[in-house]
Image (cartoon, grey):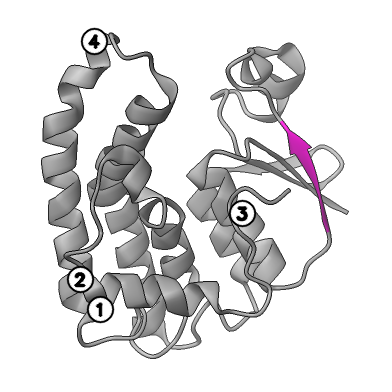
């Protein structure tokens, strides 16, 4: 059985749980205590020398890291990975956007707000993180005004990648009220058969 080594509160780990649940695949979830040093143990570093979650154990001793790479692996031969060459490239373009223009601001602002103490020096970064995060959200809003999903009419792993941290952006100080098309997109995903909330284990 597939095993996932992750942290429930992590959006990147949530991506992996989402796709497994949506595709109705059996898996075993192993919670890693990241704050307690769980990713720095010799056992964990043997799976992922970068010391980061999530890690997917495909078969005993065979591991895959990086959340979006895991999404790609699990989506193969499913409706979440398009058949068209152009559509596949379009999916990847949004997944690159998520990693370079979305996650570094929205996920990081959430991490600072949720996990760091009030006097931590990184809180000084929040105004810049929120400003740049809103630029990403507005770009998403503009696209979703004319499209049900990020590849048009079809739900894909690009939507899973972007949903993970967007749906909890409020924890990072982002107000989603000004983004009605984006909020409707969130609702469409949450209505999918097999959808599981972030906090569910």
- Magenta residues (range): 27-31
- Where the N terminus falls, by quadrant? bottom right
Q: Which residue is mark 4?
A: 121
Crowding at mark 1 (Cα within 10 Å: few <14, some 14-19, many 20+): many
Q: Is residue 105 left or right of residue 89?
A: left
Q: Which residue is mark 1?
A: 144
Q: Which residue is mark 2?
A: 141
Q: Is residue 18 left or right of residue 159?
A: right
The image shows residue 3, relative to residue 110, as above or below, that is below
- Whether pointer 2 and pointer 1 mark residues with C-beta atoms closer than 8 Å, the reply is yes
Which one is earlier in the sequence, the residue at label 1 or at label 4?
4
The residue drawn where x is 20% and y is 82% is: 145
Crowding at mark 2 (Cα within 10 Å: few <14, some 14-19, many 20+): some
Residue 96, given in percent of the width and then of the height, sits at 32, 56
Q: Which residue is mark 3?
A: 16
The image shows residue 150, relative to residue 20, as above or below, that is below
Q: Quadrant of residue 98?
A: bottom left
């Amino acid at each position: 059985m597939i095993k996932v080594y992750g942290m429930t509160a992590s959006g990147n780990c949530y991506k992996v749980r989402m796709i497994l649940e949506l595709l109705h695949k059996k898996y075993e979830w192993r919670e890693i205590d990241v704050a307690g040093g769980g990713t720095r143990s010799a056992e964990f570093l043997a799976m992922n020398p970068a010391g980061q979650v999530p890690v997917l154990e495909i078969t005993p001793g065979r591991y895959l890291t990086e959340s979006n790479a895991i999404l790609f692996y699990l989506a193969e031969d499913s409706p979440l990975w398009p058949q068209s060459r152009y559509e596949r490239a379009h999916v990847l373009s949004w997944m690159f956007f998520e990693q370079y223009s979305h996650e570094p601001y929205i996920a990081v602002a959430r991490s600072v707000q949720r996990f760091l103490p009030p006097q931590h020096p990184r809180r000084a970064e929040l105004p810049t993180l929120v400003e740049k995060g809103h630029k990403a959200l507005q770009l998403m809003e503009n696209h979703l005004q004319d499209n049900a999903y990020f590849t048009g009419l079809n739900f894909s792993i690009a939507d899973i990648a972007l949903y993970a941290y967007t749906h909890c952006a409020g924890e990072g100080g982002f107000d989603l009220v000004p983004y009605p098309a984006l909020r409707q997109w969130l609702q469409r995903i949450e209505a999918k058969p097999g959808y599981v909330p972030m906090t569910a284990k």
